[in-house]
């Protein structure tokens, strides 16, 4: 069985350091929702695929559409020899056609770009891609957090989710892990955004 070390600028698991999810807490990230990473998830499947998901534009209203920006570049990075440097990258960007419809382009998986409209399943180079608005998967009991801070007594309640019904925009990519994994099969992965 292959083991993966998961990481990200939004959520990371490494020895000696831990970072939590960001849901528009910082003034800079709150003012740029398309570049504000909320969460990052990655896992491998029994079929030998790697699934990587980044969510951004947190705290979007229920029923809202995705937030797309042609000036933001999304990166999925994979360190396959654990030297702290990315050995393989997947790049995702959005664009609009002349009718104003949004599309997505994914490079770094195979020799050709994977392209298609947002909101539908796109397949190419052995990979599957989906992007669009989604219910925020992050669970957070804000009231319990505030009560715990105020009283010093742990006051979390697993039935209270302050993010229930809120939307994020998500990029979901599933691809053969063998194309990125070598050696021990251990991979460190993280995600980034960059603006033109």
Image (tube, rainbow, N blue to C red):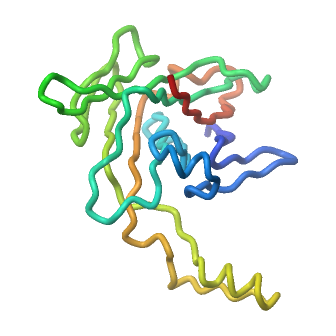
Please give left or right for residue 96 compared with residue 80 in the image: left
Q: Look at the picture and state if 57 lies above or below 92.
A: below
**Percent coordinates x, y for residue 107 in the rendering:** 41, 18
Quadrant position of residue 168 = bottom left
Q: Residue furthest right?
A: 16
Query: Is residue 22 depicted above or below 149 in this figure?
Result: above
Q: Is residue 120 left or right of residue 70?
A: left
Task: Tell me which residue sits at (21%, 40%) in the image.
Answer: 120
Seen as rendered, the residue at the extreme left is 99
- Residue 188 vs residue 2, the one in the foreground: 188
For image coordinates 39% across by 65% down, the residue present is: 166
The percent coordinates of residue 78 (x first, y second) are 62, 27
Q: Nearer the viewer, residue 29 or 130?
A: 29
Quarter of the figure that contains the N terminus:
top right
Q: Quadrant of residue 21?
A: bottom right
97 relative to 4, above or below: above
Q: Please give the name of the residue rendered at 63% of the width and 34% of the height, measured from the top-left corner.
A: 189
- Residue at 63% from the left image edge and 36% from the top image edge: 190
Pick the residue in front: 184 or 80: 80
**Splitting the image into 4 quarters, where does residue 157 fall?**
bottom right
């Amino acid at each position: 069985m292959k083991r993966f070390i998961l990481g990200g600028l939004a959520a990371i698991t490494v020895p000696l350091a831990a970072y939590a999810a960001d849901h528009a807490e910082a003034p800079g990230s709150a003012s740029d929702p398309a570049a504000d990473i909320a969460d990052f998830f990655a896992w491998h499947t029994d079929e030998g695929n790697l699934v990587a998901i980044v969510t951004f534009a947190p705290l979007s209203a229920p029923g809202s559409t995705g937030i797309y920006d042609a000036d933001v570049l999304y990166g999925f990075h994979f360190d396959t020899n654990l030297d702290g440097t990315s050995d393989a990258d997947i790049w995702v960007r959005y664009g609009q056609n002349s009718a104003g419809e949004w599309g997505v382009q994914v490079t770094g998986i195979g020799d050709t770009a994977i392209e298609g409209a947002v909101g539908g399943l796109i397949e190419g180079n052995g990979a599957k891609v989906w992007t669009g608005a989604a219910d925020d998967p992050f669970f957070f009991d804000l009231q319990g957090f505030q009560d715990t801070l105020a009283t010093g007594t742990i006051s979390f309640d697993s039935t209270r989710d302050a993010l229930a019904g809120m939307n994020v925009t998500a990029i979901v990519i599933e691809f053969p892990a063998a194309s990125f994994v070598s050696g021990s099969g251990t991979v460190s992965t993280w995600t980034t955004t960059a603006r033109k």
